[in-house]
Image: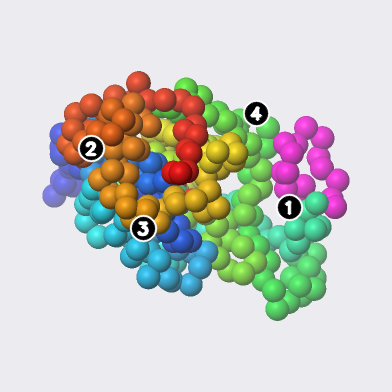
């Protein structure tokens, strides 16, 4: 019997996503990025998915639920169930095993202090892992492992060296995004799967073909693209959007005043007003206007988005 074939037109539509870390209430910077991710996805006919990146902390569903409620409050709706990274350990382990089977993973027993103290390789980018544990024999590895017990070794990617590694990528907002690649961590010594690995596995598994996120994450992207290539996964399109800065030109933070929806509500500012303010900062609304999500979608044109950070000033 001939194998079933998928007709070319039957591909499922791609998807965009927002992937908050539940580390407290979302602030205006997070909300603005979420709004942009929603607009990019919907304007291109994609589904929009939600993923809670909770690997770093014990599941705090209270924190995640507040974030999700705030996103809804702003008018951001997503398709399907919310994905929680803490439910997906098996997928990450399987990916690490696939890399490991090809000799692309090694154990690293270095502490942060070891890494800082080690001489850096010539031409290595600043902060790059110096390769201390890269070429250990099986015997040396066993000794090193025993020396740090009960702490576990971290797992690092044996990244290809030299010119074949892509450190630039096309980006809808930046034109060209850039970042360095070294032997980065895949699983930490505390057994937590590292961000770059989890993101790559999740984006591919969820069918995400468009990643919109803050431009502070652009330098991680070449590492993620390398992992996609090594795992045989597709590379999504990227749009790294400008951050919101506080009045001191540092990244917006809680110390800057009322920056979350809950705090702004306490100041008598409704969620709809916040949406209007974010929209105005993106050139999608007049000051004081309160446009609906549909209106924003109708006005959205990625080419016209501001390329600079938005400096936010607290209310008097
Ligand atoms: N969880 C990350 C954050 O909240 C975003 C990761 C991503 O979009 O790739 O900053």
Query: Which residues, given as a range, are shown in magenta?
Result: 117-134
Of callouts 2 and 1, which one flags the residue occurring earlier in the amino acid sequence?
Answer: 1
> Cα distance, mark 4 to mark 3?
54 Å
Image height of 19 relative to 273, above or below: below
> Cα distance, mark 3 to mark 2?
19 Å
Whole-percent x and y of residue 124?
75, 36
Mark 4 vs 3: CB contact within 8 A: no
**Which of 80 and 119 lies nearest the eye of the viewer?**
80
Q: Secondary structure at mark 2?
A: loop
Residue linked to disc 1: 134
Which of discs 2 and 1 lies nearer the camera? The answer is 2
The mark total stands at 4
Disc 4: CA contacts within 10 A as few (<14), some (14-19) or many (>=20): few
Image height of 168 relative to 203, above or below: above
Of callouts 4 and 3, which one flags the residue occurring earlier in the amino acid sequence?
Answer: 4
- Residue drawn at (28%, 49%) of the image: 271
Which of discs 2 and 4 lies nearer the camera? The answer is 2
Residue linked to disc 2: 290
- Residue drawn at (42%, 25%) of the image: 306
**Which of 231 and 243 lies nearest the eye of the viewer?**
243
Of callouts 2 and 4, which one flags the residue occurring earlier in the amino acid sequence?
Answer: 4
Classify mark 4 as within 8 Å of ligand 1 or not, answering yes or no.
Answer: no
Residue linked to disc 3: 266
């Amino acid at each position: 019997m001939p194998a079933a074939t998928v007709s070319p037109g039957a591909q499922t539509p791609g998807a965009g996503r927002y992937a908050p870390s539940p580390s407290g209430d979302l602030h205006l910077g997070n909300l603005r990025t979420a709004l942009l991710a929603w607009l990019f996805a919907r304007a291109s006919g994609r589904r929009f998915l939600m993923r809670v990146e909770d690997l770093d902390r014990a599941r705090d569903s209270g924190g995640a639920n507040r974030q999700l409620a705030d996103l809804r409050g702003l008018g951001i709706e997503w398709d399907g169930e919310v994905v929680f990274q803490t439910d997906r350990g098996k997928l990450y382990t399987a990916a690490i095993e696939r890399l490991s089977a090809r000799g692309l993973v090694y154990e690293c027993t270095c502490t942060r202090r070891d890494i800082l103290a080690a001489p850096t390789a010539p031409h290595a980018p600043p902060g790059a892992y110096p390769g201390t544990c890269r070429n250990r024999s099986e015997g040396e590895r066993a000794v090193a492992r025993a020396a740090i017990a009960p702490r576990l070794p971290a797992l690092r990617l044996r990244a290809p060296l030299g010119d074949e590694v892509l450190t630039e990528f096309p980006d809808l907002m930046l034109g060209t995004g850039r970042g360095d690649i070294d032997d980065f961590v895949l699983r930490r010594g505390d057994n937590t799967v590292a961000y770059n690995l989890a993101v790559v596995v999740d984006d591919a598994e969820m069918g995400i073909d468009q990643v919109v996120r803050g431009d502070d994450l652009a330098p991680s992207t070449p590492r993620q693209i390398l992992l996609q290539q090594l795992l045989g996964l597709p590379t999504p399109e990227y749009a790294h959007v400008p951050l919101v800065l506080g009045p001191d030109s540092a990244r917006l933070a809680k110390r800057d005043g009322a920056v979350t929806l809950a705090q702004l509500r306490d100041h008598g500012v409704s969620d709809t007003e916040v949406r209007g303010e974010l929209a105005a900062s993106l050139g999608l609304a007049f000051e004081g206007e309160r446009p609906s999500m549909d209106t924003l979608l109708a006005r959205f044109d990625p080419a016209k988005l501001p390329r600079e950070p938005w400096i936010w000033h607290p209310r008097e």
